[in-house]
Amino acid sequence: MSSDVALGTFELSDPEFWIAPRAYREAAFRALRAADELQYFDEWEYQDSPIPKGPGYWAVTRHDDVWAASRNPHAFISGRGVNVTDIPQEMNEFIGSMIAMDDPRHFRLRSIVSKGFTPRQTARVEGYVRTKATAIIDRLLEQLPEGECDFVEQVAALLPLQIICEMMGIQPDDEAQIFQWTNVILGVGDPEYVGSFEQLLGVLMEMFAYAQKLGEDRRADPGDDIASVLMHAEVDGERLTPQEFGSFFILLVVAGNETTRNAIAHGMKLLTDFPDQRRLWFEDFDAHAKTAVDEIVRYSTPVIHFRRTAVEDTVINNTKISAGQKVVLWYNSANRDETVFANADHFDITRPLQPQQVGFGAGGPHFCLGANLARREIAVIFDEIHTRLPNMMITSEPDYLQSAFINGIKRMRCAWR
C-alpha cells in the first residue's frame, strides 16, 4: 500500500476508516497535517440513531494547533459537547461530568473533586499500585504454569480496574460489573459491545444508580476511601450533590480504567515490536522509566480525540472558523506531528519530555486529572514484568476496538518462558 493518501479520498467520520490498516490511517493524518489549511468533514448518519446527523466539523491535526485550541477555553468551549455528535446537553454532563463543562461550573466542580487527589491521597494510592501489580504477576506465575494468557484480560485490564475500585471503596465482587460497564460505554461503534443507543443508555443508568448509592452511603457513613473524601469535600461551603458524584464516578471509572488499560496493552506490544527499545529500557529500568512511559502514551494515544465548539470567529492554520462551528482535536495526529517529534513514527524510549506529547490532553483546564496516577501504573506494571517476566512477548496480532474515540485493544495473547 502506498505511503501517500490524497486529501478528499477518505472520510474521518466513516466507521470503515477506523478498521482500515493503521498505516493507511497514519498516512491520511499526515496528509491532513501537511495541508495548507484545515479540512472540513461531514458527520456520519447512523442508521436508526435517535440523534440527528450534525453539521460537520473542522479537523485540527497539527500539534501546535491542538495545543493552542486546548489552552484557549474562552474561544473553544466544551460545554456544548466533547463528542462529535450533538447529544442533548443534559446527556453531555450526565456522561462527561466536568469534561463537558466550562467555567465557572467547571472550576467549581474540579475544585471540589481535586480534594480527593491531594498529594496525601495520591501517595496512598501510589502505595497500593505496587501491591496490586505484584499480585497480578504472582497470579500469572502461580496459576498459569503453561506460561501464556490473554495479556489484556489477565494483565492490562486488571491493574487500573483494581486501582480505581480500591480508590473508590468498591468491593472486589463488583469489579467484573464495573469492567463490563466500561467496555460498553467506550465500545460505542464496535458491534461487539454496543448494539443500540438504548443499550448504551441502559448501561449508563445502571452505573449512575450504582454510583449514587455509593455516594449516599459514603456521605452517611464515610470510610477510608476517595469516594468518602469527595462526598465530604467542601469549597466555599459547597459539596458535590449525589447526582454530581454519580456523573463524576462514571468519568473517573471509565477514564481511569479504559485509557490506562490500553496504554499498558499497547506498551507491551511496542516492547515486542521494538526489541532494541525493550532491551535498552530493561537494562536500566529506572533511568528510562519516565521517558519510556510518556513515549508509550505518545505512540499509542489511547484517547484519539475530543471536540470543542468555537464561540467566536477565529483562525487556525490559515482557516477561518466561524462562531458555532465544531472543531475536533485529533490527539493521535498531534502526537505523530513530524514537525515537532523527530522520527515521529519510531518508538523511542529516550525521547525528551519536551515538547510534550498530548496523550493526556494538551494543557488547559481539561488536562487529565489522573495523568500522574496513570504514569505510575504504567511504570510499575512494566517494572514488575521486567523484573519477574523479562521474556514476556506478545504472540498474536491485537484484536483492536472499532472506534474513532478510543485506541483500544480487546484481546491479545502473550507468552513467557
Image (cartoon, rainbow, N blue to C red):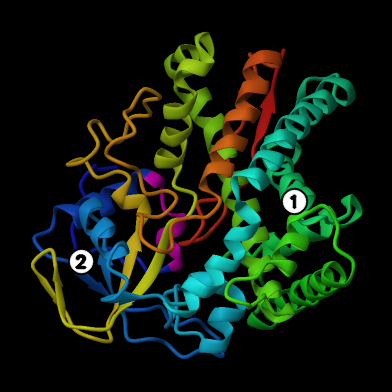
Residue 146 picture location, percent across and down = 82, 20
| Extreme residue in the top direction | 283
Q: Residue furthest front?
A: 236
Name the spot of residue 134 as percent of width and height, x first.
76, 26
Q: Quadrant of residue 313?
A: bottom left
Looking at the rendered structure, the secondary structure element under dot 1 is helix
Q: Look at label 1 and name its amino acid.
A: Met
Q: Depth check: 268 or 415 in front?
A: 268
The residue at the point 33 percent across, 27 percent down is 351
- What residue sits right under mark 1 in the picture? 167
Q: Secondary structure at mark 2?
A: loop
Span shown in magenta? 15-22
How packed mark 2 is, by other alpha carbons closer than 10 Å (few <14, some 14-19, many 20 or more), is few
- Examine the structure image and report whether residue 95 is included in the region drawn in magenta: no
Would residue 18 be counted in the magenta stretch? Answer: yes
Magenta stretch mostly in which secondary structure?
helix
Q: Is residue 228 left or right of residue 192?
A: right
Mark 1: few/some/many CA within 10 Å (<14, 14-19, 20+): many
Residue 399 point in image, percent of width and height: 60, 45
Q: Is residue 364 visible?
A: yes
Query: What residue do we see at 13% from left, 58% from top?
Result: 35
Q: Residue at x 48, y 61 (%)?
A: 405
Q: Horizontal placement of 94 versus 347: left or right?
A: right
Which residue is located at x 73 percent, y 45 percent? Answer: 163
Q: Nearer the viewer, mark 2 or mark 1?
A: 1
Please name the amino acid that badge 2 sits on.
Answer: Gly
Q: Is residue 225 left or right of residue 76?
A: right
Q: Quadrant of the N terminus?
A: top left
Q: Quadrant of residue 159?
A: top right
Closer to us: 306 or 79: 79
Residue hosting label 2: 8
